[in-house]
Structures are given as C-alpha cells and as structure tokens.
Image (cartoon, helix red, strand yellow):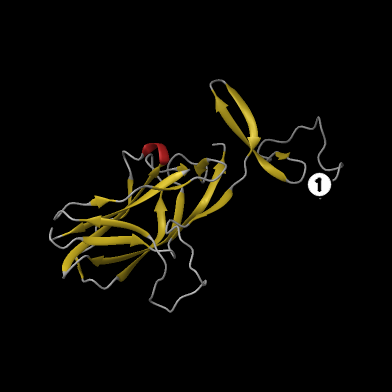
Amino acid sequence: MAYSEDKGQKDKVLLTGRIPYLGDGTNFYPALGVRSGSSITQVMAQREPFIFRPGQTALANGGVVAGSRTSSGTITTAASADVTCWGSWIQYAPVRAGKIDGLSTGGIISGQITIGHKSAAGTVNGKVTVRIANTANTAAPTTVVALSAATSLTTAETFSTYDLNYLQTDSAFNAVPFSLALGVQTAVAASAAIGRIMESSYLQGEFEPGT
C-alpha cells in the first residue's frame, strides 16, 4: 500500500542535522547527497543486502549428512608443481550496482568458503587460494583465503572450510558486481591437485545502489 498523502510537507526547511527523506510512492528512504563538481544531487540512500553463493549448483535435496557434500562444484586443476593454477572468475551481478556499505574502501562482507580438494592420482601435498575483485578490476584482485599450509591429498575428496568473519573492502574489491576465483597448487607435477568451491559457500553484506 502506498503511503498516505499527508506524510511530509512541501516548502518546509529541516534544521541542520535532521535527516531528510525521499519517497518512491510506497516507502521513505534517507536522502543521500552526491557531489559532482560544485553541485550536489539528492538521491535515495537505500542499503540492500546481498548473498552470493559461488558454488553455483544447488543441493539436490536441500540437506546432506554432516561432513559430506553432494552435487558438482567449480573445478580447478593444478598440474605444474609449486604453481598456483586459477579457475575461472565466478561473477555476482545483480540488476543494480553500487559500493559495498556505500564506501570506496572499508566496507565489510562476511561469509564462509568450503573447498573440496583431492589428487588426480596417488598422494600429493596441495594448497588453495581464493581471490576476489570488482568485475572490472580482476587484474589486481584481493586475497580472501591465502595459500593454506600444505595438505596431504589423496584420490578421496576432503573438505576445508574457511570462515570470513570480517573481510574489509579495498580499491580492488569494493562494489557489486564482483567476481571470485579459486586457485590450487600441487607439490608434485605428476599428481595433479584438484579443487572446487562447494555449494554451501556464501558471501554476504550490504551495498548502496547507485554509489
């Protein structure tokens, strides 16, 4: 239901420090002043929550036995010893775009990344990395999960989960849309390390459209 006609009065001046609100016909939102040169334009400042699931594939039945994973994820394979092999960028691109927390730097996101890893054959030490960047800035990404300590991998898939309680944005990653990529590394070229981002993984936060 649209707001009533008597809400808000025209030609009224607010005292300094009072927050003005703008309406879209249904709701009121705090106004944001956007500077362009010497002029300032008022727009609606509305934070929007987002949640990104880079594992891409939904769980078939909505639940699995604790400690196990099902369905397919994003596969990355490293065949050369001691070289990080990067998978494709996985993009999060909703209809609207904007800065995370409305800030160029210092916005906050959180989440959890679970990576499944194994070897193509035999036993090998492997490491994983996850990086993230604004979609237009993938040449200078931000590291989300650094190369972990070498993990002994076999042909049976095991899982490592990383909690991202407080990831601060910077100039390489500060806005929606953004992209994320998985990197894996093997210690033995003859036994490739394989990694994938699991379906339970997610990143969440808030962004301010139009900023």
Indicate left or right for 97 with 85 as reference: right
- Residue 97 position in % (x across, y down): 53, 40
Give the amino acid at mark 1: Ala
In which quadrant will I find the C terminus? top right
**Residue shown at 54%/52% (left/top)?**
50
**Residue shown at 14%/60% (left/top)?**
187
Q: Nearer the viewer, residue 127 or 24?
A: 127
Q: Nearer the viewer, residue 80 or 33?
A: 80
Q: Quadrant of residue 178?
A: top left
Residue farthest to the bottom, as pictured? 65
Crowdedness near tag 1: few (<14), some (14–19) or many (≥20) residues, C-alpha within 10 Å: few
Q: Which residue was labeled with disc 1?
A: 2
Give above or below for 7 relative to 39: below
- Residue 168 position in % (x across, y down): 40, 50
Indicate left or right for 50 with 9 as reference: left
Q: Nearer the viewer, residue 181 or 103?
A: 181
Give above or below for 85 relative to 209: below
Residue farthest to the top, as pictured? 38
- Residue 206 position in % (x across, y down): 53, 50
Q: Quadrant of residue 147?
A: bottom left
**Secondary element type, mark 1:** loop
Give above or below for 65 relative to 13: below
Q: Nearer the viewer, residue 88 or 172?
A: 88
- Residue 142 position in % (x across, y down): 33, 46
- How many numbered markers are drawn? 1
**Residue shown at 68%/44% (left/top)?**
29
Give above or below for 8 relative to 167: above
